Image (tube, rainbow, N blue to C red):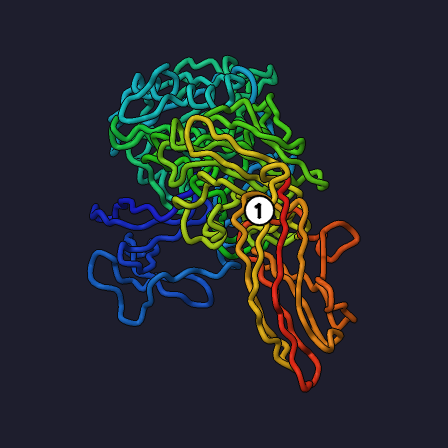
Amino acid sequence: MSAIFGETLSFTQADGERVRLVVFGDEHYARYETPDGFTAVYDAATGAYCYADLKDGRLHSTGVRIDSRDAPGDVPRHLRESGAVRAAARMERPGTLSAEAAADAAMTFGPTGGLLEGRRLSVGTVRGLTILVDFADQAATVSRQQVEALLNAPGYRENGNACSVNEYFATVSSGLLQFTNDVAGPFRMSRDITFYEKPENHDVLVPEALQAAVDSGVDLTRYDSLGQQVVDAVTIMYAGESRHIKDSVLWPHNSVIELTFGDMRTHFYLVTSMGAGPQELSIGTFCHESGHLLCRFPDLYDYGDRDGDDFTSSGLGLYCLMSAGNHLNGGKTPAPVSAYLRDLAGWCPDKVDLNRGGTFEARQGDCRRVFRYTTGVPSEYFLVENRSKLGFDLHLPSSGLAVYHCDTRGSNELQEGTPLRHYQVGLLQADGHLDLENNLNRGDSRDLYSRVAGTALSHSTVPASLLWSGAESGLTLSAISDPGPAIRFRAGTTGVNGAMFTSVSRPELRIPDSDPHGVADTIMIEAEGTVRTLKVLIDLDHDHPEDLRLVLHSPTGRRIVLSHREPLKTGEVLQYATEPPSVLTPLVGQPAGGGWTLRVSDLAPAHATAGVLSAWRLDIVTGT
């Protein structure tokens, strides 16, 4: 499906007046707003888009045209139908979808190892058939030769496009998928375009266009790469700009239609537009829909009303062709297929195991290679790739190292991040803000990891490399270099091997009686990497040490109770170390640098004399 994420588009009222609407949604369900935020619906009785009101969770027309006057005074902005209404509308979509296509429309899970079910053609040589059509009231303003160049031409750069569709898939698949298209037409359809855009006529255009191509002499046997008497890929490109009309066959989309022509039958098809002229020809939507059609890639954005979820999030945002990335640079420089889907498609023969640890180098645009960290859960793992602003990543909002948390059993409809309800693939946003999950944006400048001298990601950072269950995955990344053609990074325990950092504080703090807050003192450690060993030495004086509680707080906020009302030999320096068995053992692997705080409290009733925290020391050795 080709989704629209708040783009302002032109629409024509029945009397020919043009209006501008902001569109959210896809061909199964869409919401429209005026530029100033009032929800609009198409009113069949008036033949116009009118201001909407909400009743029983469903949008209704007020009968007031959006181009006639201001919104009625009692109508609020940004109205939305209930989740139940949206879900029902998707299932009631008109047309003759096969059971397979209906299943795709009902889920964002990848039911077959992360991919959608169905006939897959992600590796090999595939020849598609693209049929151009126009109408008496909308003649083609783009030539067949211009479309052929868009789809197939080597070195294609027309109208600002980064390449042709063929070059795009050859690049992101590392040459494993060679997808070309024969272009036929344009063929004049029997009705005006306004007939085909109506939802009730959803199933007319594709059969008519195919019949016109066959009648012209097109041999469908040329488009069966598997020898199964099935046409691999059919595209209908219609004249004029895209018609983003809810439930209309003209909304750019892919689906299934079962038609028979002699010994051949059709299966997957896609519909998109040629645009208002050559300057609007772009590869983004064609590539996105072909990703569904050929590779059975799922959408990695959130519909807001599938899989039992009615909250809208941004999924993988602008960071993948199959989320919102097909819209980058006006669709002319779409984002590459993310490492997650490339790996599932079999396009990454060079697999680098991050579990072995060490220093690695990720090159931007190296689509053959995938950096993978496996966990104890077979379907759950992490991937790392270089997404610096070069090549297809030129127009990303961020630049640097991308880290994906993957689970082929997940759904990008489910943004909760719980063990049972989480993304299929989520970007660990370096700033820890979860903007994609909270639908605050589709990506920003702080999402990817740029230069980090110490630990960038571990079980205790924000974000953390925890499993969806909340357990530790073991993934630690550090020493990340600047964005660029190559990014170096380290996986595994970090720091300089054997480097020791020692610091002493002499606060001479009086410990108040019967006060659970007690006194606290902080030592700053200027170290990179993680803790390999840790020793705490404490010099305090107290007549009743069995009344004391000693707590150490790490720079990440982790709290370790060193002693709680235990008999202590305060005449000697108290010592605690990470060698097991020890209460400090859980601090191994935690970031070493930052503020370490010791808090000492006297929990018993007041005594005649109070104790003193005289001094304490930290000895930290960082790991390799």
In this picture, is 228 found above or below 503? above
Give the residue pinned by disc 1: 423
* x then y, percent, for residue 293: 51, 29
Q: Nearer the viewer, residue 221 or 174?
A: 174
Q: What's the residue at 29%, 47% (across, down)? A: 8
- Secondary structure of the residue carrying tag 1 is loop
In this picture, is 188 found above or below 599? above
Q: What's the residue at 52%, 53% (across, down)? A: 305
Q: Is residue 465 left or right of residue 156?
A: right
* x then y, percent, for residue 308: 59, 55
Whether residue 408 appears in this view of the structure is: no
Q: What's the residue at 42%, 46% (across, down)? A: 446
| Residue 152: quadrant of the picture | top left
* x then y, percent, for residue 11: 27, 46
Q: What's the residue at 30%, 59% (across, down)? A: 37
Instruction: Identify residue type, mark 1.
Output: Tyr
